[in-house]
Amino acid sequence: MSLKEILEMNLKYLLVGGKGGVGKTSIASALAITLAEHGRRVLLISTDPAHSISDSFDMDFSKGEITKVKGVAGDLFALEINPAAAGDEISQAIGQPMQADQFSQFASIPGLGELQQGLGQDLQSIPPPGMDEALSFAKILEYAEDDNYDTIVLDTAPTGHTLRLLNLPEFLDSFLGRILKMKTFLSNAMKMMKSLFGGDQEKDRTIETLELMKEKVLIARDKLMDETQTQFVKVLIPTLMSVFETERLVEELNQHLIPHRFSVINMVNPENTNCSYCMHRYNEHKKNIEYIKSVFPLDQTTIVEAFDREIRGLDMLKELNTKLILE
Ligand SMILES: Nc1ncnc2c1ncn2[C@@H]1O[C@H](COP(=O)(O)OP(=O)(O)O)[C@@H](O)[C@H]1O
Ligand SMILES: [Mg+2]
């Protein structure tokens, strides 16, 4: 069995995730190449600050711009998003943190007390923690929803970050909801003051920007939950630690209704009867593969043996593809 089925699906989002170092970036890169070679217009995105797709392709995608990947017979584009830079961008869109004392100038306006109470902690730290990831996610959706690409292949950061990323639509939605409420309230208050004392009624673009982003998140969420449009590929290595971590990941995927029915067991030791160390590993891996299959019985599982070299550059990625797709 292989991942060949993915080529026949009309996926908008192909997410690749698992524990650190198991081969996510290599597999995401390889699958992105295959999809592009099968006629899809593909954008491969990494939000790992370690800039891993550049290493995998041995090319430079670190400029924060969408770059066409040379040497692929098809339309493959790559982008490394720096979560910190994305965070700066949102801070700019939202504006300077609102200080509690800025509210005092509106103290006499009815309803402000309740609003301030409702916002609670959010006023203390805007942007709140987690905003960097929220912003990189929002940025991904911006590219995904502009219809320039058939498929977005997402090389996710190690598990912990991935899980937070999956929380982001809700987080962003509720966060934006509160910010919008506050901004709308204050801009209405400003308008009222200005009409009393004269002055320009300048338009607040922030609200429009944030509303637009919220809309995109909501549209994308529907697609992320639709198994005909989204699949999360679990990448494992044949160790118990990797299985336990993937089980936790699956719990989160289920909670967020993200479809996942493919797994890849990577770096499996090949059989070599001339080497007792290799045979020991081989037998242990064989046992663990059976265990993994019993833990995820509904999954279509692809086994990829450990290469005798690091997977780096287009030729190696294409070689990895023959294992992922053909075998
Ligand atoms: N099947 C494999 N055989 C040999 N090396 C592999 C294999 N899969 C991945 N690698 C290598 O393992 C390292 C980690 O892979 P990477 O794709 O960066 O993992 P992750 O993104 O999960 O951290 C890289 O050096 C990569 O070339
Ligand atoms: Mg990686």
Image: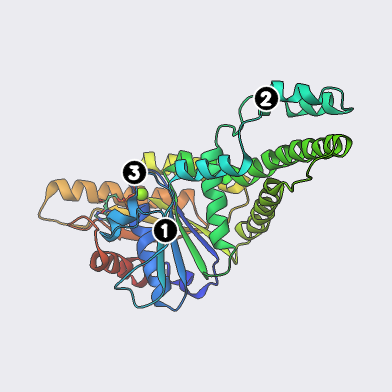
Q: Nearer the viewer, residue 123 or 149?
A: 123
Q: Which residue occupies the foreground of this view, 182 or 1?
A: 182
Q: Which quadrant does the C terminus fall into?
A: bottom left
Mark positioned earlier in the residue sequence (3 or 2) = 2
Rounded to the nearest angstrom, the CA distance separating label 1 from label 3 is: 37 Å
SS of the residue at dot 2? helix
Q: At 52% across and 71% down in the image, what residue appears? A: 150
Give the CA distance from mark 3 to mark 2.
Answer: 42 Å
Give how far across and how far down residue 22 sits, in percent: 34, 48
At x 58%, y 69%, the residue is: 147
Viewer can see residue 285: yes
* Residue wearing tag 3: 239
**Mark sitting earlier along the chain (1/2):** 1
SS of the residue at dot 1?
A: loop
Q: Check disc 3 and report its element: helix, strand or loop.
A: loop
The way the protein has been coloured in the rendering is rainbow
Badge 1 is on which residue? 65
Which residue is under mark 2? Answer: 121
Specify few, some or many for label 3: CA neighbours under 10 Å numbering under 14, 14-19, or 20 or more: some
Amino acid type, label 2: Gln
